[in-house]
Image: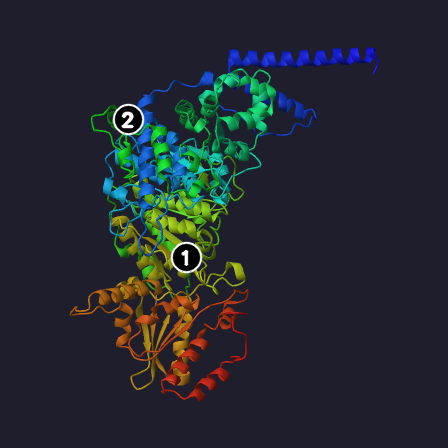
Amino acid sequence: MSSLDQAVATAASNDEDLETQEWLEALEAVLDREGPERAHFLLERLIDLARRSGAHIPFSPNTAYVNTIPPGLEPPHPGNIVLEERIRSYVRWNAMAMVVKANRHSPPDGGGLGGHIASFASLATMIGCGQNHFWHAETEDHGGDLVYFQGHSSPGMYGRAYLEGRLTEEQLDHFRQEVDGKGLPSYPHPKLMPDFWQFPTVSMGLGPLMAIYQARFLKYLHARGIADTSKRKVWVFCGDGEMDEPESLGAISLASREKLDNLIFVINCNLQRLDGPVRGNGKIIQELEGDFRGSGWNVIKLIWGGYWDPLLARDKEGILRRIMEESVDGEYQAYKAHDGKFVREHFFGKHPKLLEMVSRMSDDDVWRLNRGGHDPYKVYAAFKAASDHEGQPTVILAKTIKGYGMGQVGQAKNPTHQQKKLDMDSVREFRDRFNIPVPDDKLEDLPYFKPSDDSPEMKYLHDRRAALGGYLPRRRQKADEHLPVPGLDVFKAVLDPTAEGREISTTQAFVRVLNQILRDKTLSSRVVPILSDESRTFGMEGLFRQIGIYAPEGQKYVPVDKDQVMYYRETENGQLLQEGINEAGAFSSWMAAATSYSSNNRIMIPFFIYYSMFGFQRVGDLAWAAGDMQCRGFLLGGTAGRTTLNGEGLQHEDGHSHILSGVIPNCVSYDPAFAHELAVIVHNGLERMVQNQENVFYYITVMNENYAQPGLKAGDEEGIIRGMYKFKSAGDAKQPRVQLMGSGTILREVLAAQTLLQNDWGVASDVWSATSFTELRRDGLDCERYNMLHPEAKTPRVPYVTQQLQDNPGPVIISTDYIKSYGDQIRPFMPKGRNLHVLGTDGFGRSDYRAKLREHFEIDRHFVVLAALRSLADEGKMPLAKVAQAIKQYGINPEKANPQYA
């Protein structure tokens, strides 16, 4: 390049630099005079103009790797920093002592108790800030904030509750030792601490998902005028590693779409998951910022503590910021696993000007450079900004250190998550680090520390919570209100037989039951119908017009079916929750409503109806959480059974949901065959859950097969609830007799088999409608246990199924639309010497007509007859030749493949 060309290029470069500087100065002037909102508006207009002019400007959801709130915009901290730090240190100590003491002595049979110290160690500053300044308890004029605590931080919550006087030293000494009733559960479990924990969060990913729908449900209650929730916030503490769970991020678009500004996520970015770094080769904070900002959330990054502020202020060339940006999380973990000398060499040593920047700082000064999540001033600023923000949900991405303060054995090390034992040197280092007044001669005992009641720390602790309405966490076990349930006759429309020539399904019967509840003056407003985009499948589209679909901004369009009676109507105060194709989200909405008696002091009655195949199979973890949370409500498994939903094929056919529901202790499960059974069961559920406030929830399977309904016979109610009742008898005492049992739609095949047995083979029978083999099994197990523990009782207990069958002779044949394990649950409770044969739908599903499917799975009337004849033959009451004759007569192929494997 000639000297002239070089001079021209230099001049052009200078002009570009000058122009760039002018643009930057103009932006700074707008920021100074009109504020960041105006600056943001102008930048967006410029970008929009450039794009409209054809310029390619890629979208970037990321901001610089620094705090969102600059030092100059931080509000003053309103509390006593010194006292708060002391309280925080005492809580840290008690949490550590509790876990370490619990794991010092294993029983002779081995097996340590486990426990976690590191997660709370990284969260303590943020939890302390929330407890001192933000989280309001329930009072007369405030419904209370809801806090989803990070599950592994439970020791810290116990340590604080001990200081507050809510837990005793004996309880802390029995951490994870609950059997004798003195101890504390490992994690947040409402079932195990019903007046303390509100939400089970340690099954990672469920907390974030449940909390989003909880925040939405608060808005729903407010919109419908049921409760004033305008002051309430939902706070959610999650780990950065937890965000890899699909459920953690699965509903964040719902939160922004519905403008849930009552929702605050605090993601504890300590950069470590259970085995090592979360993003060793990248940056989890930047990644999560993109996820949340791209989904429309307000994002607050809380990365650097106040000791970094002077260095960042001196970083005129942006070198420090660039190195911060370029360093990956694996390096940041290593920095805090070593010491100040290591940080100087490996972080600041990346650029000579950075080494110069810290040349007058000692290694201790370098080591003191803190992270934002441990700085009480920065934490308060972030929490305040999140609380004040309107129109969007907020996420705080807080950078912390896993195992903060645990010394060289625990801080930022890969095994930190599993750390539950500390040697005495580490304990001494912990004590000295946090200035705990425990003398050397007592250190070996690891005593809990609690200042005197009149100490400044204790007065401050109680005063702050008094100002916020009381202590948290705290759980309400029963609602204050009482909602009476109408008598069973309110469901007369489905208790009576159907008119001649009329046929309905149990799904249609459910819709009629639901409509009757919606007409009740006391209960109607408390009903929460929940659907996952299958309204028309279940014949529930009439609810669109009747009660409206909840939509916080109303309906901004004219629906295409406006001219129809049952058009799609969305409204700000709609009652129906239409969740789209989203069973996990719908189930989370159901859980929020099903625990409203506790969270909101309002009894709600949620009905979630869905394809049964996509219920417990898909959301089983949430269903267990529902049991833990003491949910109260109805789950309706629609188109249930493996042969009822003909034509849909393998994945839609449910033969096992009753096995899955049956393992949840407080889930009461039924498979009714008839409309009157369904009505009796729902009424019983209303009495137990609404009127009596029992901690159970109901799973009821309903079908879409139409048939005539026989109506309720007086006296059958008890049997329907307990699990079985005699529906119909045929034949006389001179004939060989069998006992036939069925449930759901397959009961009709059993009834048909009764006719064949009588007409074709001269066999008498009793048909039993078994509404719940699960409830029969539970009753049997209760009796069995009682008898074992009371060997000298004058009157041993007899299982209900045994009582019903013992005076009704003959072998027992069961056929259901579920796998054989369902009916087989009652085998141990057969009367002595009684033969039991169970038919079921083991195997993969098929697409075909119902009759063909039932033949394929060998549960239809012909196989019921065959099983009955074979059982009689085994007892010597029928020749085997009759069995062979039946096989031939009914066209059964004895060589066909076993459907269990086919």
How far across and down, in percent of the image, does residue 391 sit?
Answer: 45, 28
Depth order, front residue of 195/643: 195
Q: Is residue 386 left or right of residue 849?
A: left
Q: Is residue 295 above or below residue 708?
A: above
**Around disc 1, counting alpha carbons within 10 Å, would you say few (fewer than 14), some (14 to 19), or many (20 or more)?**
many
Q: Which residue is mark 2?
A: 464
Asked which quadrant contains residue 748, the reply is bottom left
How far across and down, in percent of the image, does residue 677 sit?
Answer: 33, 62
Q: Which residue is mark 1?
A: 508
- Give whichever of discs 1 and 2 has the lower sequence position: 2
How far across and down, in percent of the image, does residue 655 sit?
Answer: 45, 63
Using the rendered image of the protein, determine whether residue 596 is visible from the camera's viewpoint. no
Q: Is residue 775 above or below residue 541?
A: below
- Determine the residue located farthest toward the front in the rendered image: 441
User: Mark 1 or mark 2: which is in front?
Assistant: 2
Asked which quadrant contains residue 76, the reply is top left
Q: Quadrant of the N terminus?
A: top right
How far across and down, in percent of the image, does residue 865 sit?
Answer: 42, 79
Three-letter residue code for mark 2: Arg
Three-letter residue code for mark 1: Gln
Which residue lies at the image location 34% right of the left edge and 42% below the top edge?
A: 100
Q: CA distance from mark 1 to mark 2?
A: 55 Å
**Around disc 2, counting alpha carbons within 10 Å, would you say few (fewer than 14), some (14 to 19), or many (20 or more)?**
some
